[in-house]
Image (cartoon, rainbow, N blue to C red):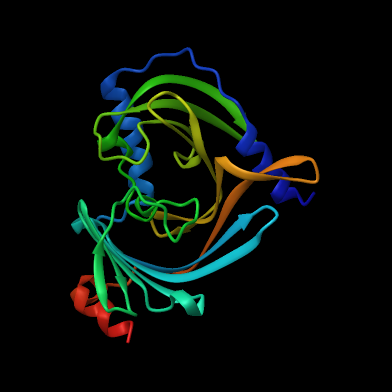
Amino acid sequence: MPPLVLLIFLWLAAPAAFGQEISRQEGRRILSRADALVSYEQKDFSAEYTIVDVRPGQGNSRTKMTIFRRDREDTYTIIIMEPASDKGKGYLRRGDKMWLYDPVPRRFTVISAKDRFQNSNARNSDFTKSTLAQDYQIVGHSESRLGSYNTDVYKLEAVTDQVSFPKMKIWIDHNHLVRKFEDYSLSGRHMRTTAIPEYTQIEDNYVPVRIVIQDELRGREVEGEFRHQRTLISVDKASFQKLPDMVFTRAYIERVSE
């Protein structure tokens, strides 16, 4: 098994135990610091994303897209470039509102940030800025070794019903970067695990450029072994150059989808 694949596998499987308590104020400071590294309030952000959805026994599917973000206005635009069957589809998010544009009927449909993105294990909410401090509070803390990293592990509970998952666990390294997420339902059922083995630093900001999302519920038995569905995300051509206001409009999506 290649070293990176083995590392990610260990990350996805690593357990955590909790015992230490953290005050509400300290918890907010910890989460705000993690948010700030991957949220770009003073800049526009754009990049190309390649998403490979791995379905055991069924083969893989690949989506390539361009994303434009303006975090200070809580908005983003996504344009699908591949596959050919989805080329021209566009997503527009503005705060709590979100639309999907289908170029065939030339129609926008209201969707939810909690929905799966292109039927992958990613959610629409995964592509916006990080808002851990706004959405969650820390209710437990421990320390854990994650691959080559010493990490602080925090157990989170949502303080709003707008999040995709009401409970989480996160692993934060000593550079304050989140290296792993575990998402849980309200009843405590483990729904999804996300590993972030690689970031790239651009000025004072960090961009996650390799992400692995494992669906803990969906998968298939292959050769006598249950294998989870996984989504592999790679990010290229990250840029913080200023974007035209037009990019964050329905008219822009309609124009580039023609």
Residue at image position (34%, 34%) is: 31
Nearer the observer, 187 or 79: 187
Whether residue 80 can be seen here? yes
User: Relative to residue 183, is residue 113 depicted above or below?
Assistant: below
User: Relative to residue 234, is residue 151 depicted above or below?
Assistant: above
Q: Residue 56, how many percent across, how many down?
A: 68, 52
Residue at image position (29%, 78%) is: 105
Whether residue 43 can be seen here? no
Q: Residue 142, how many percent across, how many down?
A: 50, 20
Residue at image position (51%, 75%) is: 83
Q: How many circles with numbers are drawn on the protein?
A: 0
Q: Residue 101, how many percent across, how many down?
A: 29, 71
User: Relative to residue 145, is residue 162 depicted above or below?
Assistant: below
Q: Is residue 119 left or right of residue 210?
A: left
Q: Is residue 206 left or right of residue 99?
A: right
Q: Residue 223, how many percent across, how many down?
A: 80, 46
Q: Is residue 9 left or right of residue 43?
A: right
Quadrant holding the C terminus:
bottom left
Q: Residue furthest bottom?
A: 258
| Quadrant assignment, res 27 | top left
| Quadrant assignment, res 46 | bottom left
| Quadrant assignment, res 29 | top left
Residue at image position (21%, 73%) is: 250
Q: Residue furthest front?
A: 105
